[in-house]
Amino acid sequence: MSLTDNWSELNPDEKFEARFESFKNPEDIDFVDEETEKKYKQAVQRLKDAIELNEPDRVPIAPNIGFYPTEYAGITAEEAMYDYDKLAMAWEKFNKDFDFDFLATSTMIGPGAVFETLDYQLYRWPGHGTDENTSYQCVEDEYMKADEYDALIADPSGFWMRDYLPRIFGSLAPWSQLPPFTDLVELPFVGFSMFPIGLPDVQESFEKYLEAGRQALEWIQAVGEIDGKASAVQGLPGFMGGVTKAPFDVLSDTLRGTQPLMIDMFRRPEKILEAMEQIVPIMIETGVRGATANNNPMVFIPLHKGADSFMSREQFLKFYWPTLKKVIIGLVEEGCVPFLFVEGAYNERLDLIADPELPEGRTYWLFDKTDMVEAKKHLSGKAAIGGNVSASLIKTGTSEEVKDYVKNLIDDVADGGGFILSTGVVVDDAEAENLKAMIEAGREYGVY
Amino acid sequence: MREELISAIADLKEDEALTLVKQKLEMGETPLEIVEQCRLGVEIVGKRYREEKYFLSDLIMSEEILRGVMEIITPYFTQKYGDQEEINIIMGTIEGDIHDLGKNIIIYLLKSVGINVYDLGVDVKPEEFVAALKETNASLLGISVVLTFCINGVKKVVDLLDKSGLRDDVKIIIGGYPVNQKVKEYTGVDYFENDPNKAVDLIKDIVANEE
């Protein structure tokens, strides 16, 4: 899938322009009126200006919203994951009442029915391991064993299908018996390769797989409509096109677990490096595909295990940064905007991520607890920054405190453009007046 | 060789540490002497972490080396080590929350300065905290809470302790991402601390005052 007929002939800057042009003029959104369409385009332009390190008309306002609309609209988190009418009601109400520059997406909540059908082991979610009002949480484990690096490196997709998926989806456990597709090279191989599919437990697992697919289709239609309506009726663009991960985090969050991977850094560093190189093109492709499919160049990359206190600078430079940098460059070459979410703090990394080899005006760093003045100092003229408004402040502070905080933040770092007003973490729990105060302060003090 | 093992542990040299432990056992050194040297090594690891020379990855590796050491020396113990020790603090992550890294860092650092910790793990029900306090007679409780959703669970622990008449005998300290002065007041706990160094100092002081 490509955006233009001559896509392969375009250079990265032309691809960037083409993606934003298409994002700004979406063919599939039927705006209710011209005013709404204008508002939508203005928001996209504001974002583009900020990314390109120019001054927009005002600071773009884009807090990260998680489960908060459930609480706001009076439904449970569990209902949001299972009852799409309630999900629609809650997100519609939230988007309408808060009305910042972008929509709070309903897609990050996820389809409970799909997880249930697949018997998802990697997460606990509302009503299934966590309280009906508590967001989902990851259950870390060694889903890939220390001696399986070679299998992963030789064939990542095969490893995912036959080793990883059977471990994280109870319903797909029989997939450990599947032969790799690469067996299918000549006629005599076909019968041998196909018979495991006929085994009763494998057949049953495929039935579950198909059912999960139908449920996911139902879900994507529902959330597509919710988000689409926020664009068409309220003129709010989405903030995220694709999603991808840093290769180190794929190994750490998804496969090995935090602690085992950290031990691997001491015991088998070469294997980590080799595996991450294999994962680089996979992560680039994932991000680009999402950006293209959703007609939005922003590719979200939540960063986890490279934070200040997790590893040393030397380890960051050896293990975390080189392959993340390749993913960033790969995305930028396809005209996408890596939207890097630094959870925790990167105070000791700012000089490293201000890497002169990264293209200027093509990335967005969302910070949580990183010192924003220092971030601006290091990334000025290189990358857009945002975030830092604390979720605790939004939950426990007063509207005045929030307003003051936002004003000071804008005074400190918004000068000259390249700044996006956002919360430091995803908001699951908040005081409505405080969130509104944040948005109002952005409108008031963020005008250039 | 005593210094060698301490350094090997402190410098996270796994193979060297394990080889030294085996040699020491062959030469007749007692498991308790070896454990003491490991403890001194761990003390240095904890110190380096607190000085920001070491990171989470180093703490984890150090624990892994110790696990290996214990595996080698356990058969040499005639009696289970640590049985008689008094528990200074009960720790756990509150119900509904399964984050364990912050809690584990504090536990590691506390152990490195000689404080005995009883770890209840994650997703711990308020009733379980109370039961553990009764069972061990510990007078300090550390609760980790990372999700704002789960703050009410901490309040419930305090309420249960009130009801059971234990509240005055127990000091409660909380830590975690959303924790601040307001959360402390709301839940009714005694202390809050998000900086691991300060938390360790605080707990050390409380334990020392009791003794």
Image (cartoon, coloured by chain):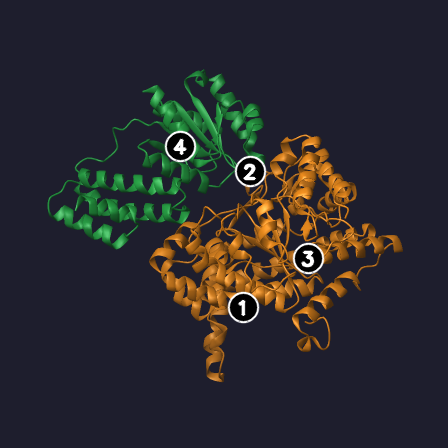
Chain colours: A orange, B green
In this rendering, the answer to whether A226 lies above or below B128 is below
Badges 3 and 2: C-beta atoms under 8 Å apart?
no
As drawn, the label of residue A51 is 3
Badges 3 and 1: C-beta atoms under 8 Å apart?
no
Residue tagged 2? B147
Q: Residue at x 87, y 54 (%)?
A: A32
Residue A297, percent from left and from top:
68, 62
The answer for which chain carries disc 4 is B
The span from disc 1 to disc 2 (Cα, nearest Å) is 34 Å
Residue tagged 4? B200
Residue type, numbered disc 3: Ile
Please tell me which residue lies in front, A76 or B101: B101
Q: Left or right: B66 with respect to A53? A: left
Query: In the image, which is nearer the foreground, mark 3 or mark 1?
Result: 3
The answer for which chain carries disc 3 is A
As drawn, the label of residue A395 is none
Residue A17, percent from left and from top:
72, 67
Residue at the left extreme of this rendering:
B27
Residue A328, percent from left and from top:
57, 62
In this rendering, the answer to whether B2 lies above or below B153 is below
